[in-house]
Amino acid sequence: MSNQAKTRTVEEINQKIRKGDAQVLTAEEMKKLVESSGVEVAFKEVDVVTTGTFGAMCSSGAVVNLGHSDPPIKIEKAWMNDVEVCHPGAAVDLFIGATNMSEKLPFEYGGGHVIQDLVAGNEVELRATAYGTDCYPRTSVKTTLTKDDLNQFYLLNFRNCYQRYNCAVNSSDEIIYTYMSKLLPRFRNATFSGAGELNPLMNDPDYETMGMGTRIFLGGAQGYIIGEGTQHSPKNLNGTLMVKGDAKKMSPEFLQGAAFTGYGTSLYVGLGVPIPILNEGLAKKTAIQDSEILTDIVDYSVPRRDRPKFGQVSYKELKSGSITVNGKKIRVSSLSSLKMAKKVSQTLKSWIDEGTFFLTSPVERLPTKTIFKPMRQTEEIPFVVSVMHPAVTCTEDEEIQAIAKRIVTKSVNHIVVVDEAGKLLGIVTSWDITRAMAEGKKALADIETHNVFTAKPDEPLEIASKRMAQHNISALPVIDIEKKVLGIVTSEDVSKLLGR
């Protein structure tokens, strides 16, 4: 290609790879080159940019074919290392879902660990049952298997390589456990995921070089993009990939089972895409920096689709270790491994340099106009706001006798203690007041509960009900993000709704 050419082809790059003349940079190296020398120089000098991610990808799994037993069995249910695996149709084809959990070690071991064990060459125990037919008479089987005993063992991931993730926070008064890991109460920490400027979809956001048939790095071996991932939503920079590869050739270094406390299991996947620099536009796109990649700060304590947001933050800020939310500086940690993402891109670079990995043009590019739709629901779900009612309140300087009269005149069992601005300080019950009067106590501070469990108006009533049952209480003050009391919901409110 002459210095005057403004485009190059994948085949031209592959010819250079065969000759050992291709210039390959990791995404990290490319950004430095563009910053120092400009886009035009980078385009002239660079043929391929390698990208990488390494993070938990819950929509991962593996298809295995066991081969027929003697006598044969048409499997109805099956388990591998006590993890139930899906039987998708044929007699001995199974799908190992990364998030399925062990029946003996739930929340500690799951399908992702089974896949890792198989990839590592370890034996796994198979148990299977069936109803028995004339041509498949066997009704049960128990054996041990390694990957070498399987006819096929393909990693088949429906949604991987998320373009970016939310930054997760928790505004509630309790610790919550999510797929974004453990979130401490009252904005005491934040978590995020994704490789930012190293992410493949961030380096080719218009999918000029990606689509069905694109050869990629997957789990330590060569794999392929087989289409858009589920929930692919490119318009808001939430693109995803569906990928496939031969797991027998993969490495447990780049496929690791994981367990998230209080949430469940998953699989960490190393994935990298080579981006052929076909034009100056791609050279410019692969120069994207973490400071240019923004994502939302989202409150995960509200278990609804449209969770509250507290502005945006860049991946540069996220990777710094701390961010500011509502004027408060908080610690932020990554659920992905930047070190491993870099290793993916470096390993892919070395394969191309060595002439063992060639680029492919996609048979069909990824769609750019897909819109992710929420589930259609035909039944209404009640939320706290639909049953809460005004709270009867008091201040800390009121006498217990006055509060007791309020309980009688208002016919309530709970009095919410607030400050002058209406913000929550505590709660007292009719039982607290009765006991205080019997013991001759006069100060509210001696009887009020300060560690108050609360609800938010936009959370499902079912969640609030479970919280009351979990803590053996009969009411939850309803508060906003600033802890201002909006109302109260009681177990009696819930019972009345269920009765209706």
Image (cartoon, rainbow, N blue to C red):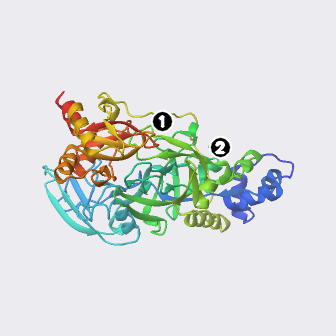
Q: In the rendered view of the protein, which quadrant contains the C terminus?
A: top left
From the viewer's perspective, tell me whether residue 182 is left or right of residue 295: left
Across and down, in percent, residue 207 comes to: 62, 43
Residue shown at 47% from the left, 68% from the top: 251
Across and down, in percent, residue 470 comes to: 24, 51
Q: In terms of image quadrants, where is residue 492?
A: top left
The circle on residue 372 is 1
Q: How far is disc 1 from disc 2 in space, using C-alphas?
A: 21 Å
Residue 273 visible from this viewpoint: no
Across and down, in percent, residue 108 comes to: 32, 64
Q: Nearer the viewer, residue 92 or 379?
A: 379
| Local secondary structure at mark 2 | loop
Q: Nearer the viewer, residue 14 or 266?
A: 266
Closer mark to the observer between disc 1 and disc 2: 1
Q: Is residue 250 above or below residue 62?
A: below
Q: Amino acid at mark 1?
A: Phe
Q: Is residue 314 above or below residue 479?
A: below
From the viewer's perspective, tell me whether residue 258 is left or right of residue 73: right
The circle on residue 383 is none
Q: Are marks 1 and 2 in contact (CB under 8 Å)?
A: no
From the viewer's perspective, tell me whether residue 9 is left or right of residue 368: right
Reading the image, the residue beneath label 2 is: 208
Residue shown at 48% from the left, 50% from the top: 168
Q: Amino acid at mark 2?
A: Glu
Q: In terms of image quadrants, where is residue 356?
A: bottom right
Q: Nearer the viewer, residue 85 or 431?
A: 431
Residue 218 visible from this viewpoint: yes
